[in-house]
Image (cartoon, rainbow, N blue to C red):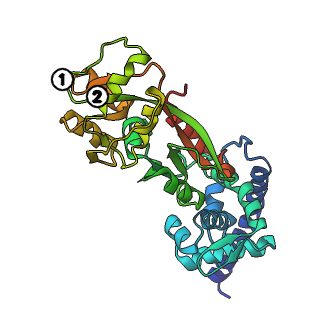
Amino acid sequence: MSFVGVFVLIVFILGRIHLKYKLRKFRVTINLLIANPNVELPSIRYIPYIARCRIGFLMINLEWYRSFIEVYRVGTVSGAAQVLHLTQPAVSQHVAALESALGNLLFQRTPRRMVPTDAGKRLYSQVVGAIEKLESIPHKNSTAETPQTIRIGTPQEFFTEQILAKLPQDDRTFYTIQFGLTAELIQQLKAGKLDLVIATQKITLSDIEYELLFEENFWLVGPPNIAIPIAEGISQADLNPLSQWLLTQNWIAYSEELPIARRFWRVVFGRRIDVQPKLIIPDLRAIRQAVECGFGFSVLPDYLCADAVTKNRLTLVLKPSQAVTNRIWLAFRKSERQLPKIKRMLEICQINVN
């Protein structure tokens, strides 16, 4: 064998020995994090090297865990591959390698989904926080956290008016926003397709947790410069004439069921509302604009109409002494409560909890 060949062989052997030593330290760190996800670790300079390198057929464990976590969240190999920007065979190989290394089947393979086994559920609850914490540890070649995408489901109006301006605009955090109704979004959260949901109601599920964010108050508003047959300071007993008059007016609603108006009527007037909406618009900001244009009356959250009332673009018909409220919640999977991105979004979204 030539001198060059011998030199290359020695370098390769030394490299394998070096990698084996580093990998042993890396596995010790992983085990420490799994045992105590809240432990504070110093900067560990070898982690980026270990987490990304491949020699021959050796695939580093962190990649296996990433693939396992995404398959668990999304429920399919193809979906996990899209999130991780990997091929489907690569994700399948990662999961199979992890199962082989642990000696446990982590998923039941069905034609449509990867269903976690009991062992898979236990592993997920143990490692998800540890892996995210590990990836956030700074190293000598990076001064920022590992890039992450936060997938949020939310009502459009509340997000636009109250949350959007509060989102940090750093280079390492990306957001995917999906608008929709709470019931649909919670199911996507449960299926692992969303990380967080801003919910207008609590839908009880064993693996979903809720944190109260905000309590919105509702006002009854009408077109600008309209004469209202009621004097300020009117007593509750004198509200009957107002309620009768309002029933003769045109109404604008979010849906045909008038969910907000019905609650308002029940709390303020002590009866059911019996009107047919003149205009149905499933967008609260569009409803506000329709009221401003004179199409009719509506019940809107105060954060959406207070400024328009101050500027005389809307008439405040009734701000009830007994507040009509609705609670806004932040929903997330219980197993992920300690994740940095969950804690961060809780801080961002906390607005005014009464």
Q: Residues within 10 Å of mark 1 (few under 14, many from 20)?
A: few
Disc 2 designates what residue? 245
Q: Determine whether 3 is above or below 239 in the image.
A: below
Which badge, 1 or 2, comes first in the chain's sequence? 1
Q: How many marks?
A: 2
Percent x, y of residue 122: 77, 60
Percent x, y of residue 166: 43, 35
Disc 1 designates what residue? 225
Q: Choose between 252 and 203: the one closer to the eye.
A: 252
Q: Choose between 310 and 245: the one closer to the eye.
A: 245
Percent x, y of residue 252: 29, 41
User: Where residue 353 is drawn, which disc sits there?
Assistant: none
Q: Can residue 140 be seen in this snapshot? A: yes
Position of 58 with respect to 300 (left or right) is right
Q: Choose between 243 and 307: the one closer to the eye.
A: 243
Position of 350 with respect to 11 (left or right) is left
* Residue at image coords 67%, 53%: 207
The image quarter containing residue 126 is bottom right
The image quarter containing residue 157 is top left
Q: Secondary structure at mark 1?
A: loop
Percent x, y of residue 18: 72, 64
Q: Residues within 10 Å of mark 2 (few under 14, many from 20)?
A: few
Q: Determine whether 166 is above or below 311 in the image.
A: below
Tell me the amino acid under the disc marked 1: Asn
Position of 125 with respect to 258 (left or right) is right
Q: Do the CB atoms of the residues marked 1 and 2 lie less than 8 Å apart?
A: no
* Residue at image coords 79%, 72%: 104
Q: Secondary structure at mark 2?
A: helix
Position of 101 with respect to 112 (left or right) is right
Q: Determine whether 119 is above or below 220 in the image.
A: below
Work out how far the residue at label 1 is from the one at label 2, CA to CA, in angstroms. Answer: 17 Å
Please state, as top left, top right, bottom left or bottom right, where the N terminus lies in the image.
bottom right
